[in-house]
Image (cartoon, rainbow, N blue to C red):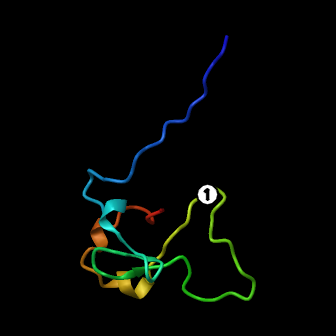
Amino acid sequence: MNYELHIPVMDKTTRKDGALSRDDFEWDEAAGEYRCPAGNQLRIQWRDYKMPRSRVTSAGSIIYRSRTTDCATCSMKEKRGPNTIVV
């Protein structure tokens, strides 16, 4: 018998639980970064490294992060969801 293996993929581009989704973030082409709904920057890196890094995870994702200080006082903090936004 032939079996087709498949792993279900959950589409998290839009959320129904009140958390921010990928669609809530805007891409800034000129800066090469995302902007959160509050207007703060999300970058691949926030500092330069002596040894260049690929910035791509073993799962093939690129993770954009904000500054801790930007999120600490943000009024949208409760909506950001349980984990980081992976693009």
Q: Quadrant of residue 60?
A: bottom right
5 versus 87 height, above or below:
above
Q: Secondary structure at mark 1?
A: loop
Residue sticking out furthest to the right: 51
Q: Residue at x 49, y 72 (%)?
A: 64
Task: Give percent across and percent down for residue 12.
Answer: 39, 51
Label 1 neighbour load within 10 Å: few <14, some 14-19, many 20+: few
Task: Give percent across and percent down for residue 43.
Answer: 49, 78
Q: Quadrant of residue 85?
A: bottom left
- Judge whether residue 5 can be spotted in this image: yes
Side of 19 relative to 42 (left or right): left
Q: Residue at x 69, y 76 (%)?
A: 53
Task: Give percent across and percent down for residue 54.
Answer: 68, 71
Residue sticking out furthest to the front: 30
Please state which of residues 50 and 30 is positioned toward the viewer in this rendering.
30
Q: Residue at x 55, y 35 (%)?
A: 7
Q: Residue at x 66, y 58 (%)?
A: 58
Residue that carries the numbered disc 1 in the rendered image: 60
44 versus 3 height, above or below:
below
Task: Give percent across and percent down for residue 74.
Answer: 29, 81
**Amino acid found under the numbered disc labelled 1:** Gly
Q: Quadrant of the N terminus?
A: top right
